[in-house]
Image (cartoon, helix red, strand yellow):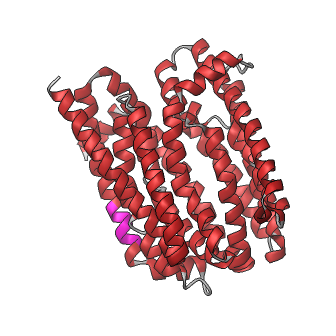
Amino acid sequence: MKRIFQIIESNNVLFKNFTSLSLLQASNYIFPIITLPYLVRVLGPEKYGLINFAAAFTTYFSIITDYGFNLSATQEISVNRDDKQKVSEIFSSVITSKLLLYFISTIIFFSCLISFNIFKTDNTLFIISYAGLIGTVVFPLWYFQGTEKMNFIFIINFVIKLITVILIFLLIKNSADYLLLVIIYSTSQVVYGLIGLITVIKKFKVRLFLTNLTSIFNQLRKSKNIFMSSLSISVISSSNVFILGLFVDKSTVGYFAAADKIRLAFQSILGPLFTSTFPHVSKLAKKSFEQFYNFNKKSFFFAFTFGLLIFLIIFWNAEILVKIVLGNGYENSIIILKTLSVIPFLYSISNFLGVQILLPLNYSKKYATIMFFALIVHTSFALILANYFQAVGSAIAIIVAEIFTITLLLISVIKIKTDMVYK
């Protein structure tokens, strides 16, 4: 016990950051889990599936506007955190770059809305869902991660989420209120983003100014490899609902989306372990490979153990979880959840090998290449399996992609370790 307290004390900032991130992730999924049983019953599988289909479509544009900055900008801020002028330059160039990407995304979004019949029937829903994206664009998550001041995010996030939950229970009464629900979600995103942006500018005295095109293109160029890997990861995780929606009715999409929400709630437990340690391992990688290697050995043990534990908990309790969280009418979600249950375990391994090892050692191009091939594998299997096996097929496609990713990442990490030892 004394040894544990010594470790915590010696890594005080890291521990505080991990705690804040854990609480943040908990609030991100506990609050939705609180409302999930209510919403799936009130809205029904069809409307719930429709809302998630719109959210999945918006996620594609979120991937473009994020551009991997949550990793690349975090790394830049972490390394330059003591240089106020440099931090302001990074902050301004990233925000300006994201706004430019948002402008481009908006043109693409409305072009899709006009061109494809699948969006025309419920175009109001898609527009409202997309409107909330501006909140994600301006929220500087990467700044808080890079400076390891995640406690501020937790406070902002908790208050916004709490108000959102209260509004849902007060205002959403039947399936006809599905548009109002999306308005609540989008408004909360915008408020969250603006508060985060103002906090950085006012409290931490970081200057925000419009940068020139050269700075924007430099920022985009530096982040392109991480963007490609983030793009692949995000598309793999978010495209399942969208691809499934192309082949099946919205009720089946609802069964899958509801089961996946439970899986993601458990998987979110792993998030703080990776996010909180990323700035730390980035510094260790530049300082000493031995220290970097030793730290990651300990981290991998925790990631592997927690991932395995989450898999077993979900698999053996799938029926109970569906009954308690989703209620009657969602029995079809049980087999889907059981199939999805292994993904947190696979994710814990693939995320560790990629984000905790390859990226800090500046192998972002290799990581991006691996994730691109994983995206091709996933999309190919998803299109085939969703057509023949519906929701379960979509779940299997994710598993195949994760196993493929782990195999390539493991080969790369072993080669890097060998090269470092014999250098």
For the residue pair 331 and 219, the one nearer the viewer reads as: 219
413 lies left or right of 138: left
Q: Quadrant of the C terminus?
A: top left
Viewer-side residue, 386 vs 358 = 386
306 or 126, nearer to the observer: 126
- In the rendered view, tell whether residue 26 sits above or below residue 155: below
**Farthest left residue?**
422
Main SS of the magenta segment? helix
Q: Residue at x 64, y 27 (%)?
A: 94
Q: Which residues are magenta?
A: 308-314
Residue 326 highlighted magenta (yes or no)? no
The answer to whether residue 148 shows anywhere in this view is: no
Viewer-side residue, 84 vs 333:
333
In this picture, residue 423 sits left or right of residue 243: left
Residue at point 42% right, 40% down?
369
Q: Residue 391 location, x and y as percent?
A: 53, 74
Expressed as whole percent of the image width and height from the top left, the position of residue 379 reads 51, 58
Residue 241's image quarter?
bottom right
**Residue depicted at 54% across the width and 79% down the height:** 333
